[in-house]
Amino acid sequence: MYKNSKHAIFFPLLLAVGVAAGLLFGQYLGRNSTTSQFMGMLRTMPQMNNKLTQILTLIDREYVDPISTDSLAEKVIPTLVRELDPHSVYIPQKDMATLNESLEGEFDGIGVMFNMATDTVIVLNVIRQGPSDKAGLKSGDRIIRVNDSLIAGQKLNMNDVVTLLRGPRGSKVRLDIARRGITELIPHEVTRDAIPIRSIESSFEIAEGIGYVKLGQFARTSFTELEQSLDDFRKKDIHRLIFDLRNNTGGFLDQAILIANEFLHKDQLIVYTEDRHHRQVREYADGKGKAQDMEVVVLIDEGSASSSEILAGALQDNDRGTIIGRRSFGKGLVQQQIPFSDGSALRLTTARYYTPTGRSIQKPYTIGDEKSYDEDLLKRYKNNEFFSADSIHFADSLKRTTPKGKVVYGGGGIMPDIFVPADTTDVTKYFLQVSGRNILYRYTLEYSDRHRDELERISTVEDLKAFFDRDPELFDKFVRYAAREGVRPVRRDIARSRALMEAQIRAYIARNTPLEDNGFYASIHPVDRVITTAIEELNKTRKND
């Protein structure tokens, strides 16, 4: 990334103040009696760099009422920045902590995963050795009160509850807990502490000899987490990998470069950036990566952006692995974050990303036309691009060729080597009813409550499969439950959607075990056509070898 000059950094702020000043001064500068006074004042001012600085000084010295130029800037800057590219953004101080939290890899809190599907906070999992675990909370507990605030049945949203539960490390919070089998509320005092956030949501052996890694975003700890996953796979003699970057919107560029370096050979180009002055910064693999011989498949979709596209593009352009899924989002602009003393920041676009073959990742945009840019994915859907690769067209001028002769295209996003359309064949009216009204998910919560002791003893995917095998009527019980909740069985719809619904039921229940997301993805992948295609591809290449 490039650092801007001081002038470039502060220009947008001065321009914002200038816009506000123009609105405030318009009525006065139109009067003959005052215009001459201001013109004279401008001539007597110290040397100024530009009109914007002069206007700012005029506001401070001469405006009829006291006014905070800082408050003007807070109102005008977001509007100003929206007139630039789609990814330059001003971040107020109040939003900075939330935006940075997940990327930094930790937050201060009590250490539980919870859900509010029934207007009550239900603890799904307790982080091992975390604050709540040490205080005695268990999976399945209901949080009724936080300090003196009743939260059960109050129709609070998730953000309200998060605000109540989080706080600075070392501070204490009192929780009144309802637990299955105990009539009275159980008080707990929890001392908040630093809670790690794992950017790798899931990592396990998904099929024989094939590892699966789901990376949620490129956080500060992503490379370190991936190294641990790869080490675990090697110990189990797993040398094939499915790397799932679907719906990964990006994050830290250096993490994408470090991860790409694990798979690429020495001196292979990973990515380069180019600024307005055509200055380039190129990143090359150093040859020390520990997964250079690992077979890899990368999964992407329209939600994969920025660092995800850099990683996928680096592997694709170097003929390293196979990209499977749908065309990625197309965010190829580099933002430089410029912090200000009040805790706010400006993320200003300073360069563009390019893949090793010279493809621009950024999709086209019109400056100031935020609406069209935001509606791009909807346009893709209407153009049938989610369902047919033939609906996606690239200009010949954007064609590039990899070292082994594979044709790839620029012009926005990464087009996968193997296109897998979005699958809606199992979506019926019955399915939409039970999922849209949250009936399916509520069933899994109640089922998990009744089998909490058994679920807590599950430690492997094999244990999980054995647990489900012991209850062959799991799905039939759900259909009866849905009927009691007002959704009449439609046999034809149920037959068509059964595999999808059964997989979701198992996945949501599995998330209530110590396996957490590993259990979820182990249960859901049989109905995920992108993952099953990836497994088939890796098995095919193994047979060809």
Image (cartoon, rainbow, N blue to C red):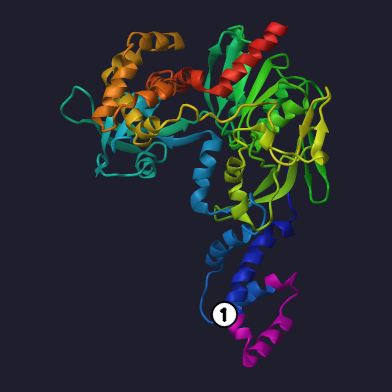
Task: Judge by depth and name the residue closer to the eye, 1 or 315.
Answer: 315
The furthest residue to the front: 492
Left or right side of 153 for 514: right
The C terminus sits in image quarter: top right
Q: Can residue 339 be seen in this view?
A: no
Q: Quadrant of residue 542?
A: top right
> Please, is residue 258 above or below residue 86 in the view?
above
- The foreground one among 427 and 246 is 427
* Residue type at the position of mark 1: Tyr
Q: Quick one: quadrant of the N terminus?
A: top right
Q: Is residue 171 above or below residue 401?
A: below
- Residue 30 among magenta residues: yes
Q: Which residues, given as a range, are shown in magenta?
A: 26-53
Give x and y (percent) for residue 318: 78, 25
Q: Please provide percent x and percent y for residue 68.
A: 53, 69
Residue found 30% across the figure and 23% down from its top: 479
Q: Which residue lies furthest to the left in this view?
A: 183
User: Looking at the image, is 58 positioned above or below residue 462?
Assistant: below
| Residue 5 in view in this figure | yes
Pick the residue in front: 423 or 414: 423
At 40% from the left and 18% from the top, the residue drawn is: 514
- Tag 1: Cα neighbours inside 10 Å, few (<14), some, or many (≥20)? some
Q: Is residue 236 left or right of residue 335?
A: left
Label 1, on which residue? 63
Answer left or right for 223 relative to 484: right
Compared with 294, 38 (above or below) is below
Residue 179 location in percent, x, y? Answer: 23, 26
Secondary structure state at the residue bearing disc 1: loop
The dominant secondary structure in magenta is helix
